[in-house]
Amino acid sequence: MQQKDNDQFSFINEKIKEKPVNKKRLLMQAGFIALMAVVFGIIASLVFAYFQPKFESLFYPEEEPVVTIPQDSVAVTELTEETETSEETEASEEPQAPSEEPPLQQPQELEIADVQNVQNKLYAVGREANRFVVTVTGVKSDTDWFNNSYESRGQASGIIIADSGQELLILTERKVISDAQEVYVTFINDVTVEASMKHYDGNTGIAVLSVPRSQVDEDTMNAISVAKLGNSLTTMQGTMVIAVGSPLGTNYSILTGNITSTNNVISTIDNNYTVFTTDIVGSSSGSGVIINVNGEVIGLVMQDYGNEEDQTTLTALSISELKQLIEKLSNNQDIPYIGLGLTTVSAATAKEYDIPKGAYIKEVKMDSPALAAGLQSGDVITEMDGEAVYTVDSYESKLLALKPGDEVEIVVQRQGAEKYEEITCTVQVGVLK
């Protein structure tokens, strides 16, 4: 009876059935997820590629290659006489046939063609040197009295002194680009690129410019070369030289001649420089370099140290005496400054006037580190940080080894009532702007 009642009232039997899988929709969702993953990966890669160099330069700055310029010295050649001693023994004595004298060569008269041949070879050296010559142009924008804008341009020659792999370094004069808003460098193949100031020396007026290698195309790199700075300390009167750059104010001109004097000196702050004079006709607006017959730069032609009004021949600063300075500028380093006008007390002068040997102080610049340290005109520098100073060159070499902010002990001999007295001054090295 019970079973019957259950059958009577149980009219609904519920059965739960699993929902069938929609394979099409599942594939669409999987495809969408995969597509989003690809898009996300692409975006992440682009963002990473964009910001990676910035983060690397921020946290891991790349060190600039160090430019080194070998310093020169005068090679001292000692002449030794060879003495031959022979022991006379009866066994080794043998008569020798008289040596035949070489036939005398008759002197040949020099023909015009021979002179022209030499000149052609010199000009060939000059043309090859023009590959490292560039034209530096400084552009300055200004307005006239009527408020009209105009551009003024200054030009000078420069030379390529180094290729670090990241940049080309150009040696030139700061004078023509000191107030320029834009600086351009034109190479031998007439390709012009923008340059920036690497560093300059406020004393000599020498500047080093930087041109990124990324701005220089392959054809230009094949057309140019890097100058080799030669040893000018061995240059003598009569040395054949070639002037390249713009010695007469014309770009890429070539002039030939000879060194006529090597004993002229110009005095600048903290140093003296040898000036070569030549028989090459020059211009007060000329610039460039003089090279030897091997194509090596031995002199720097600068407008500030150029011809006087009554002088028409070319002059140049000895490149060997500038190498240490150029190396510091090429590595973006400040030039140390003390502020002294100096001259060397030679052995003859020291003996004649009873003055200590060393670097004689002719002048102390106003507001200079030297003045603040108590150095005076008439003092003779004999030591710097315990090392002897005999000449102005040795003083400059020791100074350039220092950095602005360093302290250096300078020992001087100062004239007293009866004799020279030793005085030590501590100088804090500065920078001349």
Image: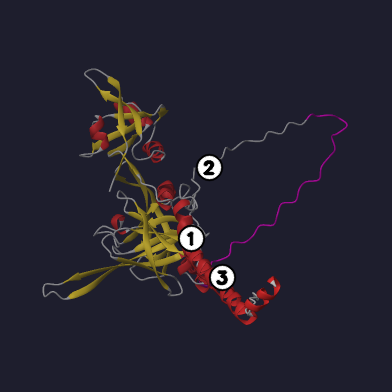
Q: Residue at x 52, y 69 (%)?
A: 40
> In the rendering, at what x and y percent does residue 151 appear?
24, 72
Of all residues, the one furthest to the right in this rendering is 91
Q: Secondary structure at mark 2?
A: loop
Q: Which residue is mark 1?
A: 53
Q: Give the left or right position of residue 3, taking residue 186 as reference.
A: right
Q: Quadrant of the N terminus?
A: bottom right
Marks 1 and 3, how far apart in space? 25 Å
> Does residue 365 appear in this view?
yes
Task: Give the residue pinned by disc 3.
Answer: 37
Q: Nearer the viewer, mark 3 or mark 2?
A: 3
**What distance separates the C-alpha of mark 2 from that of mark 1?**
49 Å
Q: Amino acid at mark 3?
A: Ala
Scheme by which the image is coloured:
secondary structure
Relative to 324, residue 129 above or below:
below
Residue that badge 2 annotates: 75
